[in-house]
Amino acid sequence: MKLTDLIKYTEVLAQGGESKGEITDISYDSREAGPGSLFVAVPGFKVDGHKFIGDALKKGAASVMIQDEAYRSDEYPWVLVADTRKAMADLSSALYGFPSRSMNVIGVTGTNGKTTTTNLIRAVLSDAGEKVGLIGTIHNRIGEEIIPVHHTTPEAPDLQKLFREMLNKGVSYVVMEVSSHALELHRVRGTEYDVAVFTNLTQDHLDFHGSMEKYLEAKGKLFSGLGVKSQKERRKFAIINHDDPQAGFLMEMSRSPVITYGVKTPADVTAEEVKVTAQGVSYFLRYTDQRLPVKLRLTGIFNVYNSLAAIAVGLVEGIPITQIIASLERIPGIPGRFETVDEGQNFTVIVDYSHTPDSLENCLQTAREFAEGRILTVFGCGGDRDRTKRPIMGEVAARLSDLCIVTSDNPRTEDPQAIIDDIVPGILKVVQPGEFLEIPDRREAIYQAIGEARTKDVIVIAGKGHEDYQIIGKEVFPFDDREVAREALRAKGWGAKK
Ligand SMILES: CC(=O)N[C@H]1[C@@H](OP(=O)(O)OP(=O)(O)OC[C@H]2O[C@@H](n3ccc(=O)[nH]c3=O)[C@H](O)[C@@H]2O)O[C@H](CO)[C@@H](O)[C@@H]1O[C@H](C)C(=O)N[C@@H](C)C(=O)N[C@H](CCC(=O)O)C(=O)O
Ligand SMILES: Nc1ncnc2c1ncn2[C@@H]1O[C@H](COP(=O)(O)OP(=O)(O)OP(=O)(O)O)[C@@H](O)[C@H]1O
Ligand SMILES: N[C@H](CCC[C@H](N)C(=O)O)C(=O)O
Ligand SMILES: [Mg+2]
């Protein structure tokens, strides 16, 4: 597309020079720029993208978009806008022909449960014969094709390009996780949603948002934007967890009809007589005048919520209720979410992606519901992330476990021991020094837990779930909790007997 045509889709403050040919892609990273690129200078949290204009031009970028007037120049073509992140999103959807207008797009936001809920919705829609695109933490997916990911919600150019690919490949529904980072950083601006789902809001990411109010405001954008500037015929819906204290705020933010779900408070879609066992949850679904039994292979009360959200989506999409339930009942589990590692041992090993105080509490409480022996918890907290959640997670783990083994999650650029030192004060609110273990090496910590286990104990290895890596410093090392647990079990003589 010609730059002059493309920039009509955003507000341009000033412009200079002639673009070197047509724009074929939009790049926010000079290392990825090339001929045909519009390089967008993003003032980052760490470095200022404007500093890389020279690098992008050397790689052949056709033009640059800036928000800092100091980078106007006679040496290269430039476009000045007020906010490059916003403009980048506007131009990305335009460059790829507004693909989200031609598919049904379902966005799921909330602190916990996004990955699980999107996967449940995907299964329901796919069983109903739709070709589904999935965007989220574990992977992106186009029908059966799996695409690895870096982010939960991609940056705007990557997202719109992916939407285009999905549309070209015949996708009718996109189900995507919408992270609060994405909402705040305008990654999803220009995406037309048809259904917005809210799971819950509890503490996380305060390093980024600064306060819970700001965090909630970011989530709210998905709902306030729903149905605005609609290009589609269909009705929009907001689907909201009515039991969450923030439900009222989000319902007010929504401009579309709201469908509520819940267990504790009256809602449009509710679950009654919930039973949690190690094998899964069961409940009676109440919807209008219907009361239907549901028996999932996923366990934990939180999965009742996730399934209610998926049921509500299925219903607004016109799928018969019995068919929705049948699809959900078939789902064996979600990778790294309360996933058991079974080598035939006489105790239980669970790998779970809980890395927030609330999800850790949910996970351990679920384990408590059926544990016949002790609960041994191996966990840590990610480096370069919300520090204030660390002692809270320590307190939660100590309160709900018989033995805590504190270890490293992804330390990233922080000192692993310093992260542990942030966690420990929370643990010490519950137990005495000497009543828990500190083992910074995660492999060693997992081996120790498995070494300590007695018959009927439950070992919970929390925080990394499906991740198959560990980030130490800036390096990414292969590491999979499930594989390491399996190795440790075999080292102890289990597995071989099977
Ligand atoms: C906090 C956050 O979201 N940061 C994002 C932000 O990074 P930043 O502002 O620090 O970037 P920076 O390093 O200062 O660089 C500024 C600009 O210069 C560019 N640059 C840099 C170097 C160079 O040589 N050339 C160049 O052009 C960079 O590409 C960037 O555009 O902009 C970058 C791209 O422009 C993103 O890749 C980056 O995501 C980082 C990697 C990240 O870890 N994000 C996580 C926290 C995240 O987004 N997580 C959520 C899920 C959270 C959840 O709900 O659990 C997600 O959606 O994945
Ligand atoms: N609805 C829920 N409410 C609270 N906790 C949940 C819920 N669903 C799942 N969990 C817990 O949170 C963990 C993460 O779940 P999931 O991956 O579905 O969430 P997410 O919102 O996608 O997380 P992330 O933001 O890290 O991608 C699970 O392993 C489980 O322990
Ligand atoms: N999307 C989350 C994932 C956290 C996973 C945990 N293993 C960690 O590294 O902190 C984040 O970026 O904060
Ligand atoms: Mg996720």
Image (cartoon, helix red, strand yellow):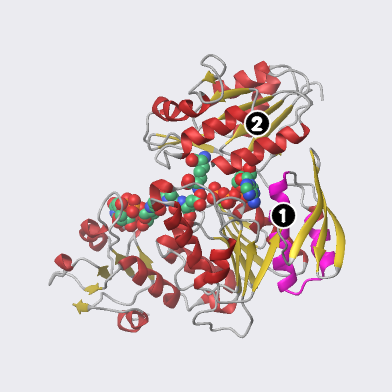
Q: Position of residue 486 (x, y in %)?
A: 67, 28
* Rendered view: 137 above or below 367: below
The quarter holding residue 65 reads bottom left
Name the disc covering residue 430, or none: none
209 and 378: which one is in front?
209
Q: Position of residue 305 (x, y in %)?
A: 70, 54
Q: Tag 2: residue type?
A: Val
- Can residue 238 be seen in the rendering of this structure? yes
- For label 2, count other residues whose C-alpha is less than 10 Å away and answer few (under 14), some (14-19) or many (20+): many
Name the quadrant of the N terminus.
bottom left
Name the disc covering residue 460, or none: 2
The quarter holding residue 255 reads bottom right
Give the magenta-colored segment's residue range.
300-328
Dot 2: element: strand
Number of numbered callouts drawn = 2
238 and 115: which one is in front?
238
Q: Position of residue 107 (x, y in %)?
A: 58, 65
* Rendered view: 229 above or below 461: below
* Rendered view: 390 above or below 284: above
**Residue shown at the point (18%, 70%) measured from the top left:** 76
Q: Tag 1: residue type?
A: Lys
**Residue shown at the point (72%, 70%) measured from the top left:** 130
